[in-house]
Image (cartoon, rainbow, N blue to C red):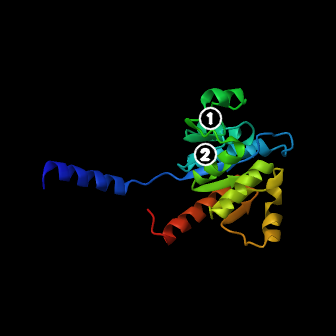
Amino acid sequence: MDAFNKKEETAATTVGAYHLKYKIAVSGAAETEFMAPDALEKVETVGRLIAERGMVAVTGATTGAPYWAAKGAKLAGGIVIGISPAATKREHVKMGLPLDYHDLIVYTGFGYSGRNLLFTRSADAVITVCGRIGTLNEFTDAFEDGKPQGVLLGIGGTTDMIQDILKNAHRGTGKVVFDTDPKALIEKVAALLKKEESEFDIE
């Protein structure tokens, strides 16, 4: 075997042995006035737990719940990716959206509704926290795509309606788990991801 082919074989072996980090999207409202008193603390905990498990946090790069999830992940030493509705960094800032607590921000230029689909599709699983209509949109996008999802109950908004929506929509429950405790919810989502990979022999 010549040196070039040997080098290529070594590279292929290295790539094959590499395990990608799970990317967990945290979906939640940019406005926080309607949330439960302990909501932001719980959302920050969700971000922290994602980082502590060695997973990557993905946010919608906005204020409110996504910002606090990003903060929790970064303060725990994690990686945070933002998916912005803006087309450029300048537009992002002019829209009043944050830059801090993120390692990188992808500027989609698709506005909020277009961004929502890219946001959920960029992740391996989605965790829904206190939400409004946009958060519900992200939940249904991920549901239609068959994504593993976790819903944090008891902290306000449309998030607490999701169980009833699934019941009345007559489409089954999909790959959705619920809990009021951030740690228990993260464990359930991690179990869903592990089960999904085992079914398809993905390493």
The residue beneath circle 2 is 58
Location of residue 137 in the rendering, given as x and y in whole percent from the top left corner: 74, 53
Residue type for callout 2: Val
Location of residue 155 in the rendering, given as x and y in whole percent from the top left corner: 81, 50
Q: Residue at x 76, y 40 (%)?
A: 30
Side of 63 where 161 appears, left or right: right
Looking at the rendered image, the quarter that the N terminus falls into is bottom left
Circle on res. 25: none
Q: Residue at x 58, y 40 (%)?
A: 80
Residue type for callout 1: Ala
Location of residue 97 in the rendering, given as x and y in whole percent from the top left corner: 70, 32
**Other-residue count near label 1 (Cα within 10 Å), few / some / many at <14 / 14–19 / ≥20:** some
Looking at the rendered image, the quarter that the C terminus falls into is bottom left
**Other-residue count near label 2 (Cα within 10 Å), few / some / many at <14 / 14–19 / ≥20:** many
Q: Which structural element holds mark 1? A: loop
Disc 2 vs disc 1: which is toward the camera?
Answer: 1
The residue beneath circle 1 is 87
Asked whether 183 or 154 is in front, the reply is: 154
